Amino acid sequence: MRIYTLLFAFLLFTRLATSQTNVTVDVKGGKHTISKHIYGHFAEHLGNCIYGGFYVGEENRTIAHQGGVRLDVVDALKKLKIPNLRWPGGCFADTYHWKDGVGPKEKRPTIVNTWWGGVTEDNSYGTHNFLNMCELLQTEPYLSANVGSGTVQELAEWMQYTTFDGISPMSLWRKQNGREQPWKVKFWGVGNEAWGCGGNMRPEHYVDVYRQYATFMTGWDNSNKVFRIASGANSSDYNWTEVLMRDIPHHMLEGVALHHYSVIDWNKKSSATGFTEAEYFTTLQRALFMDELIEKHSAIMDKYDPTKKIALVVDEWGGWYDVEKGTNPGFLFQQNTMRDAMIAGVTLNIFQNHSDRVRMANLAQTINVLQAVILTKEEKMILTPTYHVMEMYNVHQDATLLPVQLQSPYYKMGNEQLKSVSASASINAAGEIHLTLVNIHATESQEVSIDLQSGKAVFNTITGRILTSKKLQDHNTFDNPRNIQPITYTGAILNNNILKAKLPPFSVVVLKVK
Ligand code: AHR
């Protein structure tokens, strides 16, 4: 009898241990703003991101557009409140000469897009198209400059062309090309992946190149407040960050980049939709590695910049799988499933919980490339599960991060384990608290108990939305565009500032408490 009692107690204990998550939110303890810029996107001249994605040409008669930019896309992205958009690359940026893309279209030279499919780039979409499109999207441009095959003068002239208000050869040329007023461009990337497609440089060499470029990007005092972003490390290349932080004078550096993709194996990726649970687990493991990457890169930055003046800018992140069958391998077109929703949810929670240092990020890429938020097929457009997560989370933009403590059971696969639940929280100017919770477990629900530690203030109302589905591999298609979309969530109870919520397997929930 005693052995049965013990067995029962053990089973009860393990059941509780594997299904109960406890969270505390320090409602009074907020110190850092969650920069809206961590919700940035990325648009490269790659596959059908620009051509066919954003831009269908001024002469298009079948798709509604303004200046060639699809209006369905503009509408969808405005709902996301995208704060910034990075362009024109990526690897493409270090082959791009901006002067090829301004002036009369019939006179523009063509180039070969060597990195992405070897296709001919006709330069019909250029600086005016992009910067006008940013105005339409009400988003801030982030121009990625050519350092790998460009010149210091080319970059200085691009800055003058786009932003100079006075009389100069470049501002006059801009006016002749139809734009009287300068645009506002704050964010400038000084090269891309300088360790790879941007020139295969050693960090010591890149540092000197950066210093030279950065010198000619501003006046003595950077009075026009240009935000220069140095090409950053490839995932765990901590030495890259060390050399940059040590050898670039900090008055000429506003941001240091970091790129990290959730890829199982560069030589053997997985299918975007036909993946196994083991492949799902490994992809999430790669995504969660972002936390360690940020901690370690930040620790190096802290050593040289203890007041955290310089931002860590994760300007490429997302899942990377095999391309869809029958598509150009150089176009990186992949479908987007609940696995991607999980990547987005946990990654945004990680960024938010590191708001003190991570102040900008760019999901790769916006349309038809890698972990896209939008897919297009001629006149059709669909929103992906990743889109829905970005939209659900945008309530955190520019709110104050609230410290969260979390104890979660593990999701196990062989000898590996991952925390099942991830969370972050913020409070906005109206005193509303938003919590975003992700349960990555493929088969188990999680009971979550959230203690809102707020002193005397009592919260009375709770509302929520959830994104979930039947199968991890579920996705939206052009024939079934609303297969996955957020719905109202009624699974939470609020009592005496204790919130109880049940999270189904692989779900993302956003809760609002007042
Ligand atoms: O996003 C696709 C490519 O990935 C980018 O062009 C490059 O920077 C990275 O390697």
Image (tube, rainbow, N blue to C red):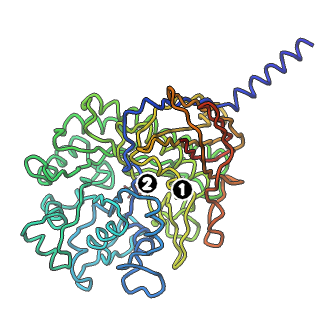
Q: Relative to 13, is 496 on the left or the right?
A: left
**Towards the viewer: 167 or 298:** 167
Name the residue carrying label 1: 386
Residue 162 tag number: none
Give how far across and how far down residue 427 sits, in percent.
Answer: 45, 40
Q: Residues within 10 Å of mark 1 (few under 14, many from 20)?
A: many
Give how far across and how far down residue 428 sits, in percent.
Answer: 43, 43
Name the residue carrying label 2: 363
Q: How many marks?
A: 2
Dots 1 and 2: beta carbons under 8 Å? Answer: yes
Give how far across and how far down residue 174 sits, in percent.
Answer: 16, 74
Residue 444, quarter of picture: top right
Report, in whole angstroms, how far the alpha carbon at label 1 lies from the one at label 2.
10 Å
Sequence order check, earlier mark of 1 and 2? 2
Q: Is residue 455 visible?
A: yes
Residue 412, quarter of picture: top right
Q: Which quadrant of the picture is home to ligand 1?
A: bottom left
Residue at 50% from the left image edge and 57% from the top image edge: 371
Q: Amino acid at mark 1?
A: Thr
Q: Say if 148 sits above or below 124 in the image.
A: above
Q: Does label 2 point to a residue whose CB lies under 8 Å from ligand 1?
A: no
Q: Amino acid at mark 2?
A: Leu
Q: Say if 97 sits above or below 360 in the image.
A: below
